[in-house]
Image (tube, grey):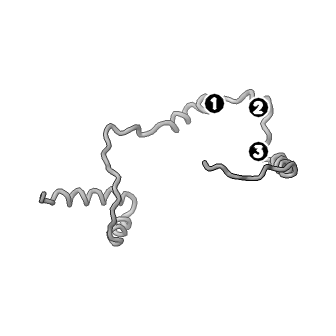
């Protein structure tokens, strides 16, 4: 993250910020007692934590290759018009076309 070259906060600015914090009913200051009772998220909500951590996992071997190419606007629009999954359908069409090619 780039370092911002900001002037220091004045006492008046700090007082204004603190007054805004104190006046916010939706975000009260945490008491020392509340801070003592804090538990890690995984301990407080183990089922939700397990769900959030679940992922697909690493690929055993890369199955796709990222490339950059220029296609006609009409081609891209035609595939996009078919709805979600258009990139997979484009890949399938290219795979079918590649099968018809004969090496030079």
Along the horizontal axis of the image, is 94 left or right of 87? left
**Foreground of the two, 73 or 30:** 73
Sequence order check: which comes first, mark 1 or mark 3?
3
How far apart in space, not on screen, are marks 2 and 3 (Cα)? 14 Å
Along the horizontal axis of the image, is 53 left or right of 45? left
- For residue 44, which quarter of the picture? top right
Residue on which the image places disc 1: 40
- The percent position of residue 21, horizontal first and vertical second, equals 81, 47
Residue on which the image places disc 2: 34
Q: Residue at x 75, y 31 (%)?
A: 35
How far apart in space, not on screen, are marks 1 and 3 (Cα)? 20 Å
**Foreground of the two, 60 or 35:** 60
Q: Residue at x 52, y 38 (%)?
A: 52
Judged from the image, the secondary structure of the residue bearing numbered disc 3 is loop
Q: Looking at the image, do the residues carrying marks 2 and 3 touch, with CB atoms under 8 Å apart?
A: no
Quick check: 65 above or below 101?
Answer: above
- For residue 37, which quarter of the picture? top right
Residue on which the image places disc 3: 27
Sequence order check: which comes first, mark 2 or mark 3?
3
């Amino acid at each position: 993250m780039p370092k911002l070259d900001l002037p220091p906060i004045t006492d008046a600015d700090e007082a204004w910020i603190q007054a805004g914090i104190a006046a916010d009913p939706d975000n009260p200051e945490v008491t020392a007692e509340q801070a003592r009772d804090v538990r890690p998220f995984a301990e407080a909500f183990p089922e939700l934590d397990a769900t959030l951590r679940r992922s697909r996992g690493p690929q055993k071997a890369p199955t796709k290759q990222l490339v950059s190419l220029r296609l006609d606007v009409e081609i891209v629009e035609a595939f996009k018009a078919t709805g979600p999954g258009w990139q997979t359908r484009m890949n399938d069409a290219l795979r079918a076309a590649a099968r018809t090619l004969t090496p030079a």
